[in-house]
Amino acid sequence: MTHVPTSNDVSALKGRWQLACACIRQESRQVGIFRGFDSSSGLIARCLARFSERNQGISQEDQTVLLAKLWLGCVGNHPGLAAQLVHEIEFALARSPRTLLAYLTASQNCTWRPRERQALLHLSLGWCNTGETRDEITAQLKTTLATYAACDGLETAPTDAYIPPSQRAVYDALLVRGEMFFAPRIHSLRIQPRLNPLIAGPTGAGKTFIVEAVAKRLDASFMKVCFGDWIPIGATEGVPTMKAIYRCLSQSPRVLLLLDELCKFRPEYSGGWTRSIASDLWQLLDRNPGTIDYADAGLRDHDFRKLLTERLWIVGAGTWQDIQRPSSSIGFSRGTETSLQERIAADGRIPDELLLRFNPQLLQLRYPLQDETVEIYERAGITALADAAGVTLNPAAHDWSRGGMRSLEDLVTTVMLKMHQMVRQQTVGNS
């Protein structure tokens, strides 16, 4: 189940909010205005933008005063909103790595949920260029990973789902957004935060596994649709994908939909089938059900615009493998001149209409670290299987770059073939 903030949490969150505002004031004095707020900052960005429109601009003094008023005016007896505001301001801080480091140092004595610092450091890596700042954030992230892996009594991963420490930051970032999406609406704004995340990662990095684990943690029904599997409305064979989604929404109070293989989408819409899929996708991402003319009795008498807005959380994923630069090391490596997010946008093969419907803060999932291999072997049951088959494993030599988690499938296949041969030889010997 999700963690629901209580009124007792507000005082602890207030300390983090005040420290974050202090760090923002310090950077604002240096650059004129804090650069970390953009459209992904949700409620904070909308309030600042509205003030700026009314007053033809916003100064650093205005910005800091408005942040203080926002906390006093919005929180009150709404601990859920307090948590949302703190998450928004901290994710904004992650866009300014040096300021984030100052904030994490100042807030060491504050109350944190497990792995929140890890998530912020991981996200901030995407905004670092090579140099001292990136090295310092990488060092802090590795220390944080080691600390959380060694501690007891931490927030545990979902049952039957082991998330390697190096991938928990993506898991936590997804979980925060999912909690915000499914939380009760405690404001009257018509414009909702853009909480649809976009995950990029190489084949076999575990994108589906992690998203499904988040769905289980959120107590949401999980539904995955690949671009190549989409059946558009009007198809003469099969069940239209939109109809399947509507069926799930009519039966489940929470639905997490993973739209995979978005990297295969192309902007030219060269065929009628692709144009039909694009029409369905825009309709879905804009929460616009259109005209539903289905014979299913279960789909009647439902306000699907409301269900799409309140019940359906969409997560996008893709490999974008052809524009990812190969890395010579596993895990965290030095940054390049342009981030993967910038290369995806500059590549031009993914329609802007699609990218703009997801949160611009890309979540990049990497293969596990080499040091995590032993634990992954044990959690997946590979070690016990190998012992039974008399196979000696060498986790230190496991090459994650050869398909990531799919390389584990190859290993399991090898071990099971060995076990099958043993059983077969024993059967032949007894006959």
Image (cartoon, helix red, strand yellow):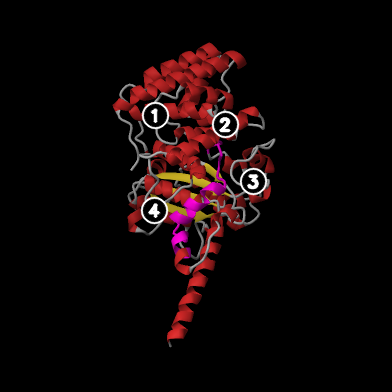
- The crowding category of the residue bearing disc 4, from other C-alpha atoms within 10 Å (few below 14, some 14 to 19, many at least 20), is few
Label 2 element class = helix
Q: Position of residue 95 (x, y in %)?
A: 56, 29
- Which residue is the site of mark 2? 137
Please provide the residue range marked out in magenta. 359-386
Left or right, 166 with respect to 215, comes to: right
Disc 3 residue type (three-letter): Ser
**Callout 1: helix, strand or loop?**
helix
Q: Is residue 387 above or below residue 18?
A: below
* Residue 189 point in image, percent of width and height: 41, 28
Per the model, the C-alpha gap separating discs 3 and 2 is: 18 Å
User: Can the viewer see residue 177 in this picture?
Assistant: no
Would residue 190 be counted in the magenta stretch?
A: no
Q: Is residue 128 left or right of residue 87?
A: right
First along the sequence among labels 2 and 1: 1
Q: Amino acid at mark 4?
A: Asp
**CA–CA distance in space, label 4 to label 1:** 28 Å
Q: Which residue is mark 1?
A: 83
Give, as a three-letter code, the residue at label 2.
Ile
* Residue under pointer 3: 329
Q: CA distance from mark 2 to mark 1?
A: 24 Å
How far, Cα to Cα, is label 2 from label 4?
Answer: 31 Å
State the image quarter where residue 1 is shown. top left
Count of numbered badges drawn on the protein: 4
- Mark 3 or mark 2, earlier in chain: 2
The x and y percentages for residue 384 are 44, 61
Classify the position of the C terminus by image quarter. Answer: bottom left
Residue at 53% x, 60% y is: 393
In terms of sequence position, does the residue under pointer 1 or pointer 3 come before the other? 1
Give the alpha-carbon distance from disc 3 to disc 4, as whole Å: 29 Å
Residue 368 falls left or right of residue 431: right
